[in-house]
Image (tube, rainbow, N blue to C red):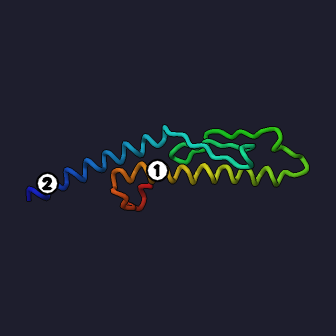
Amino acid sequence: MNNMNQMMKQVKKMQEQMMKAQEELGNKSIEGSAGGGVVTVVVNGHKKLLDIKIKPEAVDPEDVEMLQDLVLAAVNDALTKADELANQDMSKYTGGMKIPGLF
């Protein structure tokens, strides 16, 4: 019974650490870019879009589709990096074990 109590304490501690790490992800920002940096976006660790910057040379009224593609690519780049950051931060507490719904 003592082992069970000890294990439950460890699980509770791990849960608290993981919740704190999850909260801290919201304070971290990740930048993604496309087109050699003509479009950059910033997201936080919760995958919330915080900023978009578009250099004037990316704006061509004759080719709006290119700009749309660059924005999509930059956002996807940032979101991929946010996933990697979350996985990296959370694996400190899960030992690399994937826990569905956490990240």
Amino acid type indicated by mark 2: Asn
- Measured as percent of width and height from the top left, residue 40 is found at 68, 43
Task: State yes or no: discs 2 and 1 in contact (Cβ < 8 Å).
Answer: no
In the displayed structure, does residue 17 sit left or right of residue 73?
A: left
Residue at the (70%, 53%) spot, across then down: 72
**Secondary structure category for the residue under label 1:** helix
Mark nearest the camera among 2 and 1 is 1
Seen from the viewer's position, the closer of residues 48 and 35 is 35
User: What quarter of the picture does the C terminus occupy?
Assistant: bottom left
Seen from the viewer's position, the closer of residues 34 and 43 is 34
User: What quarter of the picture does the N terminus occupy?
Assistant: bottom left
Residue at the (42%, 46%) spot, across then down: 22
Instruction: Say whether disc 2 or disc 1 marks the residue closer to the N-terminus.
Output: 2
- Measured as percent of width and height from the top left, residue 32 is found at 63, 46
Going by the picture, which residue comes out furthest to the front?
36
Seen from the viewer's position, the closer of residues 70 and 103 is 70
Look at mark 1 in the image and give the residue it sits on. Answer: 86
In the displayed structure, does residue 43 sit left or right of residue 85?
A: right
Q: Which mark is drawn over residue 54?
A: none
Residue at the (60%, 49%) spot, across then down: 78
Going by the picture, which residue comes out furthest to the left?
1
Tell me the CA gap for discs 2 and 1.
30 Å
Going by the picture, which residue comes out furthest to the right?
62
**Secondary structure category for the residue under label 2:** helix
Amino acid type indicated by mark 1: Ala
Look at mark 2 in the image and give the residue it sits on. Answer: 5
- Measured as percent of width and height from the top left, residue 96 is found at 37, 58
Q: How many marks?
A: 2
